[in-house]
Amino acid sequence: MNAEDTTPRETWSKWIHRWILGLAYAARPGRIGDLPSLLWHSALDIARGGTVVPDASRTASRPDTFAGICRDISALTMIEAARKGFFAWAHCGPLKWWTREKRMALVFNEHKLEKRCLREMKKNAYRVSFDTAFETVVRECAAPRAYNWHTLTWITPLMQRLYRDLHRLGYAHSFEIWNADGKLVGGGFGISIGRVFLSDSLFSRERDVSKMVSSALYYHLAKWGYVLCDGRDYTPMQDAMGYREISRADYEAILAKHAHTGGRQGRWVAEADLATVAQWVSANKRPAIAGTPGKTSVHETATAEASRAA
């Protein structure tokens, strides 16, 4: 069977469902005020023929931060855009380029977990892996949540095809966690650009497994010389795990220095179990860099960690 045939197709009912939820999302208080600006800037960009790769000097302040309608998007244009801080995203309508004035980022020696989760990891009842079930993980991340029938996803069939192409080219990777019965119970996927990893989505079927598998990802990224994990938008889970909000300028400075070289090439393979990862997380309960109280800039911390890894 051709690999193209394995990509889920969206039925008319699912397409209508997604559009209804997408429009409702755009009309929520706090977002509807940006809708006229989004429609106006979208129309202008469509009139220009759309945007192949966004330009950092041409972004709209409302909504935060629109950079054009994707034209002729491919895996390679996604990577070129990612190295400038942009990502493709849309719930409905044409795929659009975005960045953020503020985004969540993790430097690995600031990662933390609750004691309960660490104790569970030390039991080694779960197994972690990389790149063994990529398309399954992407589909699970795109699927509706059992606890929320009206889950709205941006991982449309088009995005799934693009991520599959990124995986084949060695840029996109999945991280998986399996229970004692050998069942896939959680995982996520993202994109590797140089020594920066962009974590795009997670799913979980059992308690705390998304935190466990994310911790395993961070351990390996730190070991392999990565300097940062980009989580994009704020979530309570990221905040609890040590992510911090950084400015667009800081993020773009990190990309300029670290997104073009280095990184882990080829298919990824797990090199440590969860007990080892738990020990590493526990060792991170210290200031990132000795000196003044509080956190140093993320750029300084990432650079210091890269020097240690080298």
Image (cartoon, rainbow, N blue to C red):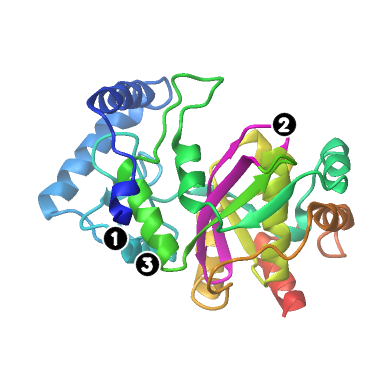
Work out which residue is located at the far left of the displayed protein and give it: 47
Q: Quadrant of residue 284?
A: bottom right
Q: Quadrant of residue 236?
A: top right
Residue at 26% across / 57% down in the picture?
73
Q: Which residue is mark 2?
A: 207
> Label 1, label 3: how many angstroms apart (C-alpha)?
10 Å
Q: Secondary structure at mark 1?
A: loop
> Label 2, label 3: how many angstroms apart (C-alpha)?
36 Å
Within 10 Å of disc 3 (Cα), the crowding (few <14, some 14-19, many 20+) is: some
Type of residue at label 2? Answer: Arg
* Residue stretch in magenta: 183-208
- The one nearer the camera, 77 or 291, is 77
Q: Quadrant of residue 238?
A: top right
Residue at 87% across / 64% down in the picture?
291
Work out which residue is located at the far front of the displayed protein and give it: 1
Q: Secondary structure at mark 3?
A: helix
Q: Is residue 213 left or right of residue 94?
A: right
Q: Is residue 61 left or right of residue 135?
A: left
- The one nearer the camera, 253 or 90, is 90
Residue 260 drawn above or below residue 88: below
Residue at 26% across / 29% down in the picture?
11
> Label 2, label 1: how many angstroms apart (C-alpha)?
36 Å
- Select label 1 or label 3 by which is in front: 1
Q: Which residue is mark 3?
A: 80
- Select label 2 or label 3 by which is in front: 2
The dominant secondary structure in magenta is: strand
- Percent from the top left, x then y, of residue 123? 87, 45
- Percent from the top left, x then y, of residue 9? 29, 38
Q: Quadrant of the C terminus?
A: bottom right
Q: Quadrant of the N terminus?
A: bottom left
Type of residue at label 1? Answer: Ser
- Percent from the top left, x then y, of residue 251? 54, 60
